[in-house]
């Protein structure tokens, strides 16, 4: 049975007309689900009993089953969901004083196997469909932190641009005034650097934020961390990013996970400055979040600060991400990994 959240406004309208119903019911249903947080058809009181029964016979709403929830001392909440087929995915709610960010998964597992990430340790299983992605967002909106959900980042398990159609459809529902009405500039896609998808995204006409996982300023080092670099090396990725910035007039964020002894030396900072020269971008430095299954460690605090200072002196716009949720395995895939190994 299809989850109704996988339908766009126009798709639902078309189906209701096929059911012999008025198309204005579409707006009522969207309002119940996305504005009021109602996920039971019987509670949609301004719909006729006949329509509610038709909806129940043909659709479900939010089939996610909560398997586990963890809450950090810093307020971060991590949710492990069981899907209808028995697979698991994760979502994280990250509160600050002024915002609540939902970190969303796009796939079950990941095929790109970045060396520092838990998401791909159990391999890739499948893409999430649009409804499953929207269900993550709705669950966070309706159940976490007691705050209004303001931002969405596709930085959970999986590669969003490898599940392009479902992710873009979900984003349009999240952004729509009929849907969750979250502004495009408050929605971020994070990618390992799939160049054809980056070029395609540039033509979508969406003012969303793009975050590219870089993690090195040279191909040799990046390949040690990211096998994708063999397919899409820096000499092709950086020009594609330059083209994206020019076409969209949007700044790109480059994510840089700092791993001790691998990419955290001052010469690594110099290489980074060189390849990003002239780009409208910022660097987000992320000290590595250790996982039990990994062999990597974060650099010393002093080395991190020296690295950051070198970038700043070269005119690079740089931020240092504050670690969140380390006491609850908040890094991508950690909770799912433990659950599926038990």
Image (spheres, rainbow, N blue to C red):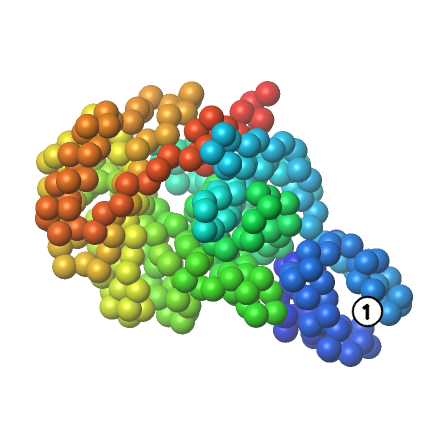
Q: Nearer the viewer, residue 302 or 67?
A: 302
Residue 333 in view, yes or no = no
Residue 108 image position (x, y, % from top left): 54, 41
The image quadrant that residue 145 belongs to is top right
Mark 1 neighbour density, 10 Å: few (under 14) some (14–19) many (20 or more): few
Count the marks: 1
Residue shown at the point (37%, 30%) measured from the top left = 289
Residue 107 in view, yes or no = yes
Q: Is residue 200 left or right of residue 178?
A: left
Q: Is residue 230 left or right of residue 139?
A: left
* Residue at image mark 1: 46
Residue 89 image position (x, y, % from top left): 57, 39
Residue shown at the point (75%, 73%) measured from the top left = 25
Q: Which quadrant is home to the C terminus?
A: top right
The image quadrant that residue 286 belongs to is top left
Residue 191 image position (x, y, % from top left): 37, 50
Residue shown at the point (30%, 52%) measured from the top left = 253
State the residue lying farthest toward the front: 97
Circle 1: element type? loop
Q: Nearer the viewer, residue 212 or 317?
A: 317
């Amino acid at each position: 049975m299809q989850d109704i959240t996988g339908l766009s406004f126009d798709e639902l309208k078309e189906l209701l007309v096929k059911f012999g119903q008025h198309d204005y019911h579409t707006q009522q249903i969207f309002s119940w689900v996305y504005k009021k947080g109602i996920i039971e058809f019987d509670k949609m009181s301004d719909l006729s009993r006949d329509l509610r029964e038709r909806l129940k016979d043909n659709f479900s709403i939010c089939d996610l089953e909560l398997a586990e929830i963890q809450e950090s001392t810093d307020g971060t909440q991590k949710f492990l969901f069981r899907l209808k087929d028995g697979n698991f995915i994760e979502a994280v709610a990250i509160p600050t004083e002024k915002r609540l960010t939902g970190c969303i998964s796009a796939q079950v597992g990941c095929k790109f196997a970045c060396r520092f990430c838990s998401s791909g340790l159990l391999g890739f299983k499948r893409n999430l469909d649009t409804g499953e992605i929207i269900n993550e967002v709705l669950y966070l909106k309706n159940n976490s932190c007691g705050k209004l959900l303001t931002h969405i980042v596709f930085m959970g398990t999986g590669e969003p641009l490898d599940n392009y159609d479902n992710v873009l459809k979900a984003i349009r529902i999240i952004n729509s005034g009929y849907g969750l009405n979250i502004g495009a500039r408050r929605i971020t896609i994070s990618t390992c650097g799939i160049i054809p998808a980056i070029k395609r995204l540039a033509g979508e006409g969406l003012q969303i934020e793009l975050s590219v996982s870089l993690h090195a300023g040279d191909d040799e080092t990046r390949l040690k961390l990211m096998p994708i670099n063999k397919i899409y090396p820096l000499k092709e990725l950086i020009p594609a990013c330059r083209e994206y910035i020019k076409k969209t007039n949007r700044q790109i964020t480059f994510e840089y996970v700092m791993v001790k002894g691998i990419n955290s030396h001052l010469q690594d900072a110099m290489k980074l400055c060189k390849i990003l020269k002239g780009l409208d971008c910022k660097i987000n430095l992320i000290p590595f979040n250790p996982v039990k299954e990994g062999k990597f460690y974060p650099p010393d605090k002093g080395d991190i600060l020296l690295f950051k200072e070198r970038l700043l002196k070269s005119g690079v716009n740089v931020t240092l991400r504050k670690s969140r949720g380390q006491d609850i395995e908040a890094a991508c895939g950690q909770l799912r990994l433990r659950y599926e190994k038990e």
